[in-house]
Image (cartoon, rainbow, N blue to C red):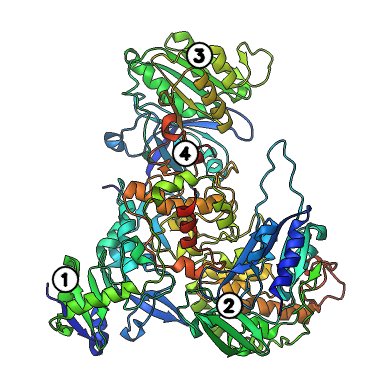
Amino acid sequence: MKNPYIPYEVKILDARYETPGDRCIKTFKVTFADEKVWDTWSHLPGQCAMVGIPGVGESMFCISSSPTEKGYLRFSIMKMGKNTTALHELEAGDSFYVRGPLGNNFPLEEWKGKNIITIGGGIGQAPLRPVIQWIRDNREDYGELTVIYGARTSADHCFKDEFEELNSCGDACCHLAIDVEEEGWPHFVGFVPQLLMEVSPSPENAIAVTCGPPIMIKFVLQNLEKLGFTPDQVYTTLENRMKCGIGKCGRCNVGHLYVCKDGPVFSYAQIKDIPEAFA
Amino acid sequence: MVEVEKLREIAREVISRDDVRQLIGYRQGTYGFRARPAFITSPEEVDQLIFSPACVNNLATYLTLEEKLPVPRGQEPDLRKVAVMVKGCDSRALVQQMEEKAYERDRIVVLGIPCTGVVDMDKVEERFPNVLSRGEIALEGDKFILSFDGRREEVPKEELLADKCKRCRYPTPLVYDQLLDQEVARFADDDYSDIVELEKRSAEEKWAYWEEKFSRCIRCYSCRNVCPMCYCEDCVLDRLNPQWMRRSVDLSENTAYHIARAYHLAGRCIQCGECQRVCPVEIPLMELNRKFYKDVEELYDYEPGTDAEAPPLLATFKVDDREDFIL
Amino acid sequence: MAAKKLSKEKVQEALQELTKFRLIAPAKSDEVVIFKQITDPGEAFLDYGNSTVPPKKVVFPQTETLFRFQRGNPELREKNVEEEGTTVIFGLRPCDARAMSIVDRLFSWDFEDPYYLKRRELTTLVGLACNEPPSINCFCTSLGGSPFGKEGLDILLTDMGDHYLVQALTEKGEKLQDILSAHLEDAPAEEEKKAEEMAAQAEGKIARSINTEGIPEKLPTLWEHELWKKASAACLGCGICTFLCPTCHCFDIQDEVEEMGEGRRARMWDSCMFSEYTLHASGHNPRPTRRERTRNRISHKYSYYPKRFEVIACVGCGRCINLCPVNIDILEILEQVVDAS
């Protein structure tokens, strides 16, 4: 069995900034330096990988591309601390290292035939993007796709070009929001939970998936309940500080669940009675 | 000897006050002769408080250890005082903490305990091993009286007394709101004779000595956490960005850790000896700290933890400060 | 396999035989008993209670290299644990061996941890039964262990006075016993029976206990109970309880850069009681105070671990009780859990 602590080298095909500012987000499109790795690599939306640079460290990020996007992996990384600052220095042609795929995936098989609503905030859209992409690439298998996404300002929206494309192609219905009024913004102004109530999706044969800041998740969950969604119709991802990513080092536990092994994807039913999930 | 009833009466009166949030004292441990910290918030809990030669912990460390959480919106911060019981050596920690402006004098209520010495619990447990039921230690004259399992054993004081007490200069607390007993006159002094002996060793001997000790260190950080003077929120030994100390445990990093910490305590360590007591692998940390203590006294005629109004040593400059040791 | 006997006069030569392997035995460093590699059999100190630092550090070193790297070279050089060679831990207590079996379950769960598991494979455990419980705070019998426990051991030695009774328990144990055959004789008849009687006596001397039934299920229901605040009030947030615990296994992973662009990714013991254990890069900490961390530690050992691996992650060695500087007592906390409504 391969040593799960040894990462693969990846080469950056493309690196670009999604958002500006102190906590800017950079998206990397990478491929394995050793092409043969693709033969054994398989991941599903929701799964993550440890991304890092030897000499600096590793951090866990969701794989922001669907396996239906062939030949590359995408990571969208927000600049926050030592590791992410070092990663932000890298450009196309450089390398870093990836360990994965780790964690569990969204149960897309079970979701076949259902209407999917994704509700994202800020960088929380990164784990939702592969879900959207997977549905687009397997369109007949799924019902309606509703995408609700908000950020603080229009500049803080990730994947801006993809949203325009998404709305016009007819695969999905997109609803965008920003927190505060901005000149020239044609869409909703307000927080994501409020936009959710505006859109008011039906819980009939539907699954809601949400990722974003904890405060947003809290109100989104409340609002989904108001709209009639049951806990097992709602999915989210949890995060915690992680080191090994493979269930050994002990630190990522939320109650009895290890975020790196039992998660990061959880249904609300699984975690609603675990107080630590909302700490 | 502190009378327990009087101690509890005073404690009851203090914790009943509206402006006191918590009282930190001592209570009986869970087995044998051990005593442990007590944190009481109501008069009903006062009856668990004790004081005896088994009360070895320095409670002053809790004043800087308690986490300061952000106050939830709409709530006011709890500005009530904390009452703490301190022996002579512990009180010096309070003085030094106030000298460094860790908190203002009016935030604490100090119940001072003039101390005739505490035991070295390792020596007690070696002398009377495997005592499970709760035992008590008292001092009568120059003998410790140990009561346990229906027995009453008398042991000459110096056989069980903690080493630090044999050198104690300040048995009566230097700061207090109330004294729980009559003052105790100084009964010992520190002539640094053991440090002078260590200083005489050659460099090779010193390295070999400390290599044996530091190789045992498991970097549990108990020495740092128990120390009342180690309260930096962002300890240099924890920082990752930039990283000053590796987390890996080997002779090199362990040596760096202990020497760095000893330097950070120079002119600040008040000689409570807790670091050495808590070390699970028996590293003689006080030898490092006392070497600095001796140097500071000789070079600058300064003893930390004795004058709350004095400026901290290393924040002070005098024109006639000795410089001959600076290369 | 028939039991053997090792005369105490022959212990030195038997140990000498074992020095051809990596022989780890209890030894003294000043007055502290530690497990270390010995090359001189005279260093072994078998007349001991229990070590401060458990022998878990032999199969799960406090610090170890995962791989090495060199700037400019994309290849990562994995640490090869095989190089450490066959290891014998001689004279460990049954609780410490049982603890390794408990921790094995995690290190082989789903992903196999090659470093730990390879070391376990290369290590033979020769245990020494406790004729007397080493400490007043031992409570191994409450958790399914025993002073004469065989679980996890390859060989069990019992001190019968002028000799040790030697019982091989596994294939590894039998192999080692064969290697030592020149120094062993057949054990007298009835000796194993006598050892069983000694075991019962030793178990009878265990002074402290806790009834663990129902604790794993009850702990999550006590999440907001006030007992956690009281239990953790004196806690210093140090790592003594976790580092000295034979079943604790949490670790940190850090990269270290040495000279000339060389470096390594290493892992080292970490403690869930340290304040920065779950500190996020954003500054958020889901366990900001000692109360949350104490609650998590006890819950992990007595509820989360048994939920997943069907065994409580505690062997009752008592080190945490003996060495906690502020006398935080896990048995007292568990009694409060049992009594709590």
**Residue C237 sits in which quadrant?**
bottom right
Identify residue for label 2: B136
Mark closest to the chain's N terminus, 3 or 4 = 3
Residue drawn at point x = 41 percent, y = 51 percent: C215
Foreground of the two, B212 or B86:
B86
- Kindly identify which residue carries mark 3: A174
Q: Residue at x 61, y 29 (%)?
A: A20
The disc label shown at residue C175, or none: 1
The residue mark sitting in front, 2 or 3, is 2
Front-lying residue, A109 or B69: B69
Q: Secondary structure at mark 2?
A: strand
| Residue at mark 1 to residue at mark 2: CA–CA distance | 52 Å
Residue C233, placed above or below residue A186: below
In the image, is A251 to the left or to the right of A17?
A: left
Q: Hey, what amino acid is under mark 4?
A: Ile
C161 lies above or below B264 = below
C-alpha separation, residue under disc 2 versus residue under disc 4: 44 Å
Read off the residue under disc 4: A274
**Spatial distance from mark 1 to mark 3, Cα to Cα?**
69 Å
Identified by mark 1, the residue type is: Lys
